[in-house]
Image (cartoon, helix red, strand yellow):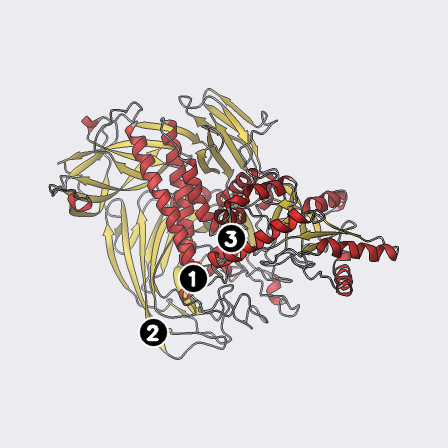
Amino acid sequence: MNFHVISHTHWDREWHQTYQQYRVKLVRFMDELIELLENSPKYTSFMLDGQTIVLEDYLEIKPHKKEAITKLVQEERLLIGPWYIQPDEFIPSGESLIRNLLIGQQIAKEFGPSMQIGYLPDSFGQAAQIPQVLNGFGIKNALFWRGITNEETEKTDFWWEGPDGSSVLTTHLPLGYGNGRMLSTDSEKNLKIIEENLNELQEMTTSPNMLLMCGFDQRSAIRELPEIVDELNRHFSSEDSEYSIKISKLQDYFDAVRQESEKMETLKGEFRKGKNMRVHVSIASTRLDLKKENFEVQNLYEKYLEPINSMSLLLGNSYDNALINQGWKYTLQNHAHDSICNVCTDATHKEMELRYQYAKQIGETLQNSATNDLIEKIKFDFDKGLPLIIFNTLGHKRSNLVEATVQLKSERFTLVDRNGVLIPYQVIETNRENLNDKQIEIGVKNEDQFVWTTKISFLAEIEGLGYKTFYLKENEENPEETSFVYQDGVFSNDFFQVEIQTNGSLTVKEHSTKKEFKNLNVFEEGGNAGDEYDYSPPREDVIITTKNSAPSIAVIKNGPVFATVKITHDLELPVDTDVNGRSKEYESMMIETFVTVNRHEDRIDIKTVINNTVKNHRIRALFETDLKTNTHVADQQFGTIQRENYLPQVEYWEEEKWEEKYYPIYPQQKYVDVSDQDKGLAILNKGLPQYEILKSLEPTIALTLLCGTDYMGKQDLVDRPGRRSGLHVETPDSSLIGIHEMEYSIIPHSGDVVDAKVGLKSNEYIAPMVAVQVNQQSDLSKFDDNNSFFQLNHSDIAVGAVKKCENDESMIIRVYNTTDHSIPLVKAHINTDFFTNVEMVDLNENVLSNTNERIQCDQGTLELKDIASNEILTLKLS
């Protein structure tokens, strides 16, 4: 047996201490490590936890050490990368995972070679798309710890295949990333460690190779490791043993294991089973306020900032990649597995809030600047009125409602398109304002500038990635409203009817299938005796629902475009919960729900506002489907994943002494859909990453809205018995006392999730079109007031990113298959006024060879062929 001793540390950048507290330790750790490697040639390698952010954090304090680090990296004695930061794999968006590796590789390149191993030692479960993301950077090997059991494989090494067919040679660590951490100068103990690893792992290995992971959390290098290895080799040599031990690299281990790779089995999908080590299956419910902020920042960068900056670049303006990437860095720093899962102290979570604010400030400022620069290059026809430019940042032709805020001298105005056709709109709100109140006065008092600020909603159709201009004509009467979306207690449009029941739940009659969905958006409240790592019920719970509630119901807005109805529940809830049960004392808590239906789209949009007054409880919105099906589909990073409604492990996890309960509570990106192929129900969300499937054979979707807890870690939970995770530290901020808003949407549909184009509609839901009023013409204007740069002509293909290439002025457009079906041909249109060449590149933005058969472009018509299930394709347009 060849023992590969991997000397390493696992560096949690923040957790039960803050980033700066840990950085003090990091600086001392790095000082010692550099000195050790420089003065001990026999210490052949040390792995820096697969993340390059530790170099940034250290060199910000000691920049003069960069040359020493560079020398060690180039000698491949200090192993860095490939990630920027060790990520959680489920909550960050797919584009965030790509940027994590893209930025990590950029930083590594400044020093020398990057470790090309998908190293994920402590992520709370493994996402199905990781093989494809790794392959996109040329990474062919992966290593992880949590989530896999002997139900999937009895071996440590296997092929892990992604939904598109990508695969990585993978090793999992049954004993974790510290199975060799106790090696010391005590020879007797060292032999015992070797023996224990052989007893546990020898039957599981697929080759005569075994990993001894010599490191742990915030652990310094063992200075005597070369001597320890020499001593072990002398011992086994004297016994004429076939054991050899060396300080090794993960790449050496994979090179050796790959020789046996033909014998290995292939596993597919995600790994989230907490049998041998916890994956904290319910962790996506903690600190949903921060997870919502994460969604908003990701959405800002992916759906608005980068696409609008890219359009501006095409019209001749600048694109500040360094600033944009700095905003990405602040966001990614929050994607560390402990951070984004929110299993930290309140002080650490406050620092996360600051980073999100920094990223928003950068993103919003750059977006406004790019929008203004872009508008300066457009030639508007002011004879038609004041321009109102609408941006479509998605890649397909779309017809959706747009909200626009306009400031005019007149309260009366009409809206027309560039051909003079009248566009109906509905007023959301209007106010009289003095613009002087928003301007700085220097030296003298500014003149008053009174305007009518009016927010309106109207239907706009835009061809693809690009913009279209409408015109505002003042002092003209908008046509009178003649029909209303909400009449006689019912919302109506061409797709469905929605009736609000006396208990506040929704009943929806979908027209095409005649299917009636009842008991939609029923609220369920129950106790939470868990901690930041896991929801867990008390032994005796009290469940309170709104099924028998009598809320107040009021029409807020009603018109020809949309209607909104407000439903107010006032609930009496137990004020606290512990592991045994719920308190006898009760407190009033208000839930306000705003239900909006518009005439033109097949969505029922919901905004729920919870004024949380009690501790240690969970609130969910329930949606009965009344459909008979064993599986459902959820949105994952780049596409969908099919999951089971019922997990049999729920019956035997306690008997087999699993680390935690395994049941159908799952992470999601933008939606979950239940369908019986003829009809279905999709629940879309904006930053609500967790759902559970109840009543598996006739599934009910339970969407987690709020889950409060008062401690980082607790012992002996009902769903997670035994030791605690984390520390027993109070985290009052995680109780989420106060007002919280959440948004989600219901789509009843015919057919399955693909027939209903739920992937496309979910992108439209989270990324509404942007409207900007233009008040004056620029001297720089020369481009038409209507432009489409790129348009996809297939509803199952979506744009994941639009950005400037990292290395030149070309434009990167990333598309992906939103479904689990292969697609033989996709057509798109590119604007030949701006692009003459299209190439396929990898996720690292390097041109791929041998792709001519898959991509062809002729006179602006682009053809993409043979797109696999959930496949990501990255195009470089120049």
Q: Amino acid at mark 2?
A: Glu
Numbered circles on residues, count: 3
**Mark 3 / mark 1, whichever is N-terminal:** 3
| Residue name at image x 50 percent, y 63 percent | 16
Viewer-side residue, 24 vs 14: 24
Residue type, numbered disc 3: Ala
Q: Is residue 293 left or right of residue 283?
A: left
Which residue in the structure is indicated by mark 3?
A: 336
Residue 674 location (% of width, % of height): 49, 52
* Label 2 vs 1, first from the N-terminus: 1
Q: Residues within 10 Å of mark 1 (few under 14, many from 20)?
A: some
Image location (x, y in percent) of residue 826: 51, 31
Residue denoted by label 1: 347
Say if mark 3 contacts mark 1, CB within 8 Å.
no
Residue 388 vs residue 79, the one in the foreground: 79
Percent across and percent down for residue 758 are 45, 45
Give the distance between the C-alpha atoms of the residues marked 2 and 1, in whole angstroms: 28 Å
Q: Is residue 190 above or below residue 437?
A: below
Q: Residue at x 56, y 29 (%)?
A: 847
Judged from the image, the secondary structure of the residue bearing numbered disc 1 is helix
Do we see residue 534 in this rendering? yes
Three-letter amino acid code at the position of disc 1: Ala
Expressed as whole percent of the image width and height from the top left, the position of residue 710 reads: 44, 69
Mark 2, residue position: 587
Circle 3: is it few (<14), some (14-19), or many (20+) Cα within 10 Å? many
Q: Nearer the viewer, residue 514 or 399?
A: 399
Q: Residues within 10 Å of mark 2 (few under 14, many from 20)?
A: few
